[in-house]
Image: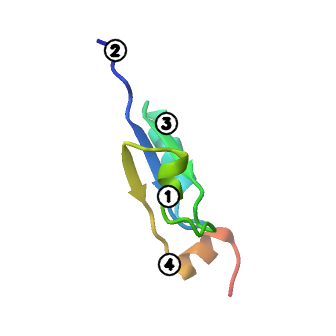
Amino acid sequence: MIAIPLVIGVIGPCAAGKSTLVTALEERGYAAKHIAQEHSFVPDMWYKRIKPDILIFLDVSYAVAKQRQGTSG
């Protein structure tokens, strides 16, 4: 029997840490996909594009996002 790896989808707003998490998961052998959805008006776009077995939603406050992006306001 051949094992089919689970696909992990990672979704969330800009600067929430999606790329960091996807990289860390991939380094550990997981099939992880960054799902860019923050500007989409289609609420289930994450499923239509990737169809992940597991979905991780990250969140971030406005203040922390601005700090991570190196901007203010």
Q: Which amino acid does label 2 sit on?
A: Ile
Give SS at disc 4.
Answer: loop
Q: Is residue 51 left or right of residue 38?
A: left
Residue found at x 44% / y 63%: 58
Could you tell whether 22 is left or right of 1 in the image?
right
Sequence-earlier tag: 1 or 2: 2
Give the farthest residue toward the bottom.
73
Q: How many marks?
A: 4
Mark 3 lies on residue:
26
Q: In whole angstroms, how far apart are the C-alphas of marks 3 and 2?
A: 20 Å
Labels 1 & 3 near each other (Cβ < 8 A)? no
User: Where is mark 2, residue-wise?
Assistant: 2
Q: Residues within 10 Å of mark 3 (few under 14, many from 20)?
A: few
Q: Where is residue 10 in the image (x, y as percent from the top left)?
A: 47, 52
Q: Mark 3: which amino acid?
A: Glu
Locate residue 43, reporting x and y percent: 50, 66
Sequence-wise first label, 4 or 2: 2
